[in-house]
Amino acid sequence: MAAPLLTPDELHDRCIAAVVQDGERIGVLAQGLDAGRTAAAGGLQAEVPWVAGWTARDLIAHLGAVHRWVTGILRAGSTRAPGSYSGIAPPHDDLHGWYALGLTELVATLRTTDPDAPAWHMSPAAGRTARDWARRQAHEHTVHRQDLEAAAFLDPAPVDPVLAGDGVDELLAVVLPRWQHTAPLVTARASVGVTATDLERGWTVEVADGAVRCTDGAIASADAQLSGTAPQLLLHLWGRPAEVTVHGDRAAEALLRGR
């Protein structure tokens, strides 16, 4: 039996709860690394295994900057593009406090902003409302929490399969179209069926000359088939190691990666 989809408001609330849960765990893990309370050597200089050149400190600095950037987007209440977050950096002496403050302000803003209020988004396929950012931040924190657990040599905490399924949906239907004008998508012609085996939920992604189209249901005639549980698909599609199965054209399947 297929897992029931959440209503938009249920999904919004579930996403905010995930930002709180994973965001707080990330903060605790960072403090544990810094204090030498994990098996990883090097404290916050521990490497994130599958993100080249990134340390745990880089990951925390990235999330803290994104917290402040997204909070600004939501508070602006406009679809006008904001400036980059590349100039937002933590202080040298209080990374943990800076991270915690940014998370607190982000969560408070997500909770108090009308989900349907206008908000800029980088993807042309997004609804450009505040609820898009609750969704984006939930899935970003889920993936990066597992990055940090790997850096700390800890087993990953469980991921809600229904929320992971929404993360797969967001990547295929919203994130990929953001990059449709760039290589390799801009010149590719391929179709890929994707199946979340634990949810009995599927998608078909069609890429054709600079356009990405995602529809519900995995068609059997697609050039490639990708399957796995929703949490494993989410990791795989964001370029992390995962237990998934690929049949057919692997080059076609490889087009489905978040950036």
Image (cartoon, rainbow, N blue to C red):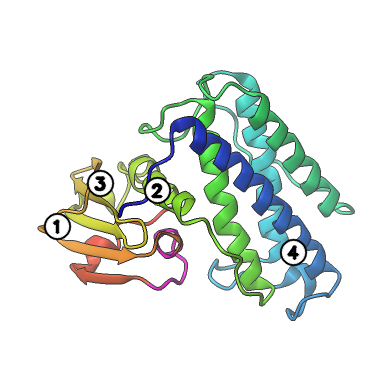
Q: What residue type is labelled 3?
A: Val
Instruction: Give the camera-side residue of 231 and 65.
Output: 231
Q: Is residue 129 above or below residue 49?
A: above
Residue at the image position 41 percent from the left and 35 percent from the top? 123
Residue at the image position 50 percent from the left and 30 percent from the top? 9
Point out which mark residue 29 bears: 4
Q: Which amino acid does label 1 sit on?
A: Ala
The quadrant in which the N terminus is found is bottom left
For marks 3 and 4 on the same chain, the one whose residue lies earlier in the sequence: 4
- Spatial CA distance of label 1 from label 4 is 41 Å
Residue at the image position 23 percent from the left and 65 percent from the top? 251
Q: Which of marks 3 and 1 is in front?
A: 1
How far across and down, in percent of the image, does residue 177 sit?
Answer: 33, 41
Which residue position holds label 2? 171
Would you call the spot at circle 4 few (<14 residues within 10 Å), some (14-19), or many (20 or more)? many
Q: In this view, does 71 lie above or below 14?
A: above
Would you call the spot at circle 2 few (<14 residues within 10 Å), some (14-19), or many (20 or more)? many
Kindly state the secondary structure of the residue where label 2 is placed: helix
Point out which mark residue 1 bears: none
In the image, which residues are magenta?
232-243
How far across and down, in percent of the image, does residue 218 sit?
Answer: 21, 53
Instruction: Give the camera-side residue of 44 and 83.
Output: 44
In the image: residue 67, left or right of residue 30: left
Q: Quadrant of residue 43?
A: bottom right
Which residue position holds label 3? 186
Instruction: Give the camera-side residue of 165 and 236.
Output: 165
Which residue position holds label 1? 222
Q: Which amino acid does label 2 sit on?
A: Leu
